[in-house]
Image: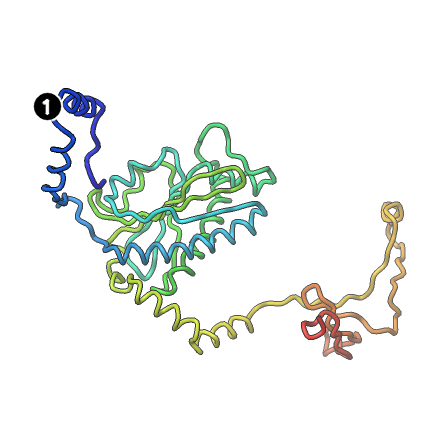
Amino acid sequence: MAGDVLTQAEIDALLSAISTGVVSAEEMKVEQKQHKIKVYDFKRPDKFSKDQIRTLYMLHENFARLLNTYLATHLRSFVHIDVVSVDQLTYEEFVRSMPNPSVISIFQMRPLKGNAVLEINPNIVFSIIDRLFGGPGLPPPKSRSLTDIEEAIVRRVIVRSLETLQESWKQVITIEPRLEVIETNPQFTQIVPPNDMVVIVTLQAKIGQTEGFINVCIPYLVIEPVMSKLTTTYWVASSVAKQSSEENIASLQRKLEKTVVPVIVELGRVKITVQELLDLSVNDVLQLESWAEGELTLLVGQREKFTCKPGLSGKRLAVQITQKISKGDEDDD
């Protein structure tokens, strides 16, 4: 967008003029030095400074890392996501650049007012769907719209992806992304007037052998209230302050204490053959390896942590912990 692109006819005419001597290469160099004029379009003025663009780039690099980790774990496949560019252009130009059909998610960024767009290339979407359905992660040969079942699956993936966006924006503002609707036709996604400026964060995603782009479109009007925070100085300072904050440590501790952990009391175990399993019927008795008067094993998660004795507490079954099992603790590793 920095300059005009010459047509093939204009290029041919220029080369012809140089070859015939009408225009010399030296004259062109002198003229280029004399006219150093920067073109400014008042219809689409620059809304974001270079420092703000740089901050948005770093901010969404963190988003790319978090999204990469989530998809790699969820899909159990090779995933690589990188930020390619951060550009500012009109919303109309962004809409024209999207393929049809595509997967376009319109979401809110509360408490910021207005909507933003998360656009994912159909090849990436169908690769995710195929992988979740047990396939190798290959898109269909021809692009198409999502079925109702596929849309329900994609909706869950997008909601989780927006949570990673929330995490990456925490150093600037605590947002609560909320998915509004998923569209396939770019013409149905008019969230702002066509000439309004937006910032486009383009990420290149590779899932297995499939490649495509993921675009985050945020209108200027949405992030205008926090523009003063979109500076490298503020971003780095808030990052350092967050790492050393006692409140942050206390918050993490509170969240950890509220984590739900399954606790299981194992009555006993028995090993049988597949034939014996097939021959089981009503009133058959399986003899466990544990004794009736012996102690039971209490598992926290999938680890044996305590031994206990069964009993009653009021009208409920209960166990009384008798000993701690230290095997597998970090102190013993």
- Which residue is found at the position 16% from the left and 31% from the top? 25
Q: Is residue 49 visible?
A: yes
Apparent side of residue 80 relative to residue 222 in the rendered image (left or right): right
- Which residue is found at the position 32% from the left and 58% from the top? 55
Q: Is residue 117 visible?
A: no
- Residue 84 lies, in percent from the top left, at 38, 46
- Which residue is found at the position 55% from the left and 38% from the top? 137
Q: Determine whether 133 is above or below 178 in the image.
A: above
Residue carrying label 1: 22
- Which residue is found at the position 52% from the left and 46% from the top? 79
Label 1 neighbour load within 10 Å: few <14, some 14-19, many 20+: few
Count all numbered tags in the image, as a single digit: 1
Apparent side of residue 322 relative to residue 331 in the rendered image (left or right): right
Q: Determine whether 227 is above or below 307 in the image.
A: above
In front of the other: 169 or 158:
169
- Residue 114 lies, in percent from the top left, at 28, 54
Apparent side of residue 297 relative to residue 242 in the rendered image (left or right): right
In front of the other: 289 or 310:
289
Apparent side of residue 264 relative to residue 201 in the rendered image (left or right): right
Q: Determine whether 143 is above or below 238 in the image.
A: above
- Residue 99 lies, in percent from the top left, at 36, 34
Q: Quadrant of residue 204?
A: top left
Tag 1, which secondary structure? loop
Quadrant in which the N terminus appears: top left
- Residue 3 lies, in percent from the top left, at 20, 38
Quadrant in which the C terminus appears: bottom right
Amino acid tagged 1: Val
In front of the other: 236 or 141:
236
Colour treatment of the image: rainbow
